[in-house]
Image (tube, rainbow, N blue to C red):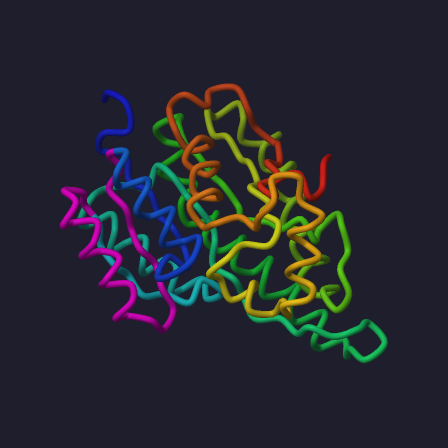
Amino acid sequence: MTGASGRVALVTGASSGIGAATARLLAERGMRVVVNYLRSSTAAEEVVAGIEAAGGRAMAVQADVREAAAVESMVEEVQAAWGGIDVLVHNALTPYVIKSFQDMTWEELGGKLDGEMRAAFAVTKAVLPAMTEQGWGRIVYLGTGLSRRPREGMVALGTAKAALEQLARYLAQELGPQGITVNVVAPGPVEDTRMAKALDEELKQRQIAATPLGRLAHPADVARAVAFYVGEDNAFMTGTTAAVNGGLSMY
């Protein structure tokens, strides 16, 4: 197998934003891409159609990634069509509230932690058997700069993604001997995403002013970092976090 040709990549939450940009780029680089979505079947099919029009291969598969049975069913559908999944890009964003800790209930914080980890657990468990069997795999989780740099009202998302980032390190350690790398791509604010819509214009301008590269990220900026991590060229980076934020936060 040469280059990315024929590799099967599952991108969760791929009907819009970062997920859609990543699906398009991986397809452009020769991977067969599974466009997972929760509700937006029309948008997911549009992503698939765009990939196919450009000469790539893709399929849309519905699944709530928080539900282990739904994830298993999705992976079985992909296996029937294309075989095992070589690359997992876990991008799907589970719901969360934006409010202060003092105004928050345990159900709101605990619910986000549970949803975040449940989804990561389910999709990772489902793709590991094929990766382990062939001794090659790439896993990338989408994190956030909020895991390390707090912002008002974002305690639920930032705390849940910090847990995801630590899970990635443990998995990197455990799965490395089996030829599987596990990394995190942690964007700052990204244009054209649901999270960006939570920024009011004044905060957005402050973020841009604090960013050395002078703008917010575009989904394609994040997709390129993901594409590097999941490619054949990335043979020796695992357990790392790539900050895609234009220098807004450096770590």
Query: Which of the 4 image quadrants contains residue 42?
Result: bottom left
Query: Which of the 4 image quadrants contains residue 82?
Result: top left
Residue 93 sits above or below residue 91 on the image: below
Q: Position of residue 144 (x, y in %)?
A: 62, 51
Q: Which part of the image, by quadrant, shows the N terminus?
A: top left
Q: Which part of the image, by quadrant, shows the C terminus?
A: top right
- Seen at 71% across and 69% down, the residue is 110
Q: Which stretch did the figure color magenta?
A: 30-57
Residue 67 sits above or below residue 178 on the image: below
- Seen at 19% across and 50% down, the residue is 80
Q: Position of residue 203 (x, y in %)?
A: 69, 63
**Toward the viewer: 37 or 149?**
149
Horizontally, is 201 left or right of 99 in the view?
left
Residue 43 falls within the magenta-colored stretch: yes
Residue 178 sits above or below residue 101 on the image: above
- Seen at 55% across and 42% down, the residue is 185
Q: Position of residue 45 (x, y in %)?
A: 23, 63
Residue 182 falls within the magenta-colored stretch: no
- Seen at 59% across and 49% down, the residue is 143
Horizontally, is 219 left or right of 173 in the view?
left
**Toward the viewer: 209 or 169?**
209
Q: Position of residue 171 (x, y in %)?
A: 59, 37
